Image (cartoon, rainbow, N blue to C red):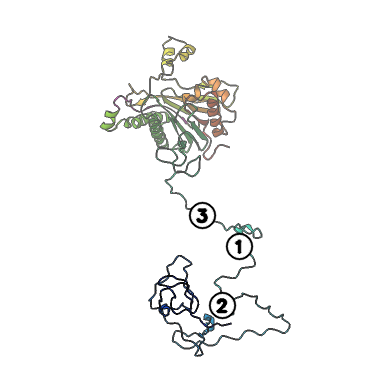
Amino acid sequence: MSQMPQQAAVPKCPSCEEPLESGDRFCGACGYDLSVVPARPEDSPTLAINGAVPPPDGVDWPVARDSDGHGHPAPVHAAAELPGTDSGGSPLPPPPPPPAVPPSAPAAPAAPAGSPAPGVRLDRPGEPDEYPLQAPDPRLTAEQAAPEPAPAPAPAAAEKVCVACRAGRVDDDGYCENCGHAQPRERDHMEQESGPIAAVSDRGLRHHRNEDAFSVGCTALPDGAPASVAIVCDGVSSATRPDDASLAASRAAGELLLGALPRGTHPQQAMHDAILAASHAVNALADEPATAREQAPHQNAPACTLVGAVVTAGLLVVGWVGDSRVYWVPADRTTPPARLTEDDSWAAQMVAAGLMNEAEAYADERAHAITGWLGADAYELEPHTASFKPDRAGVVVVCTDGLWNYAESAEEMAEAMPPDAADRPLHGARVLVGHALDGGGHDNVTVALLPFPAPPQGAGSA
């Protein structure tokens, strides 16, 4: 029920603080006029509930809204209950009536206590019947649940990807920028098949790089007869850039042979000219800037050895400088094989001079010191060439000392080579390289196999 406001009782005299009684108009002790004491305000004081300081007295507060004319404040409306206007100030059309409820439909339950009034919108979306799964819905197919991702952009053609982690880029020094793994060099293991001939080169098990190189190819003589060519070079490890020397020599010799034979040059003359071309290519590597020679004045010129073979329908031509070799292994293993070259080495000179037998010479630590090579510092270039006319079919083996160190005699080479090498030269070359690796692989290993006679054009290994 409502109560009328009453004057507040003053408990003590404001002047002498003598206790007063209700209804006193003057203090009984000092006679202070109690009518000047202000009355207690009707409203309760404002309390700060969030640490804010109440505004001081004397502030001009805004005037409250007008009452309804009967002493009662105007009713408070929700925003949805007030008529709105459009952008032009005209009243909005009334909302459509709610749809009629069929008689059979159950009546809507009454809103529970505390529910918001009609028209009040809570800024919260309705909750779905099913929540989306963080993982793909197992009820969907694999294509629907996980759409195929867009393909990653292909790396630039010049960039190499690490063979170890398959992610890092390989720098110019051959190491992965991600895991630091040293990448295999392109020349660590090489294989090539050209028509009926094949060659394989491997770094071996002890050397840090492959200093061998080869060149193989097929062409035709002016009369249309087929011809096969193989060049094998071994870099001199004590020289500067032996790998560059062997590569330059093999390319130069191979290109000259493949170009000269179709023009009608005799195979033996073409082999001689090829060795000279290889020598010029290696000599050109020594033409370095003066600053390079000043920084390393005691370096030797690039150098390598060379051995090659040309096989035609009835002729076998070999050529060499150094200690790489050519072997002849007949298809009929009951007939003896043969070695077709003589080494330019200290051991060969001792045997030729009659100072040592072959076993003693090659057992000496100076045996593999070469006396002939290609390079600017060679004493005198003496290309060796020889022609043979085998009377039966067989296989020509062209190799470096990385192989013949483990199969030195012709009989040992024939025993190491598989019997089907003429039909499968690439397989045969792989077997011979494996023979050297199984024996220790102390040096680079390179071998090329040429079937004799040269098969017709278009024939290849099985």
Residue neighbourhood size for the residue with mark 3, other residues' Cα within 10 Å, grouped as few (<14), some (14–19), many (≥20): few
What's the magenta region?
296-310
Residue 391 seen in this snapshot: no
Q: Nearer the viewer, residue 190 or 347?
A: 190
Label 2: state its secondary structure.
loop
**Image location (x, y in percent) of residue 277:** 36, 31
Q: Is residue 296 above or below residue 4?
A: above
Label 2 vs 1, first from the N-terminus: 2
Q: Nearer the viewer, residue 160 or 92?
A: 92
Q: Residues within 10 Å of mark 1 (few under 14, many from 20)?
A: few
Q: Is residue 166 above or below residue 346?
A: below
Q: Are marks 2 and 3 in contact (CB under 8 Å)?
A: no
Tag 3 secondary structure: loop
Q: Amino acid at mark 1?
A: Pro
SS at mark 1 in the image: loop
Q: For marks 1 and 3, give the CA distance.
A: 27 Å
Above-or-below relation of 353 to 307: above
- Work out whether mark 1 precedes mark 3 in sequence or the reverse, and give the earlier one: 1
Residue underneath mark 1: 132
Q: Which residue is mark 3?
A: 151
Which amino acid does the dot numbered 3 rest on?
A: Pro
Q: Which residue is mark 2?
A: 120
Reply above or below: 428 against 105.
above
- What type is the residue that disc 2 sits on? Val
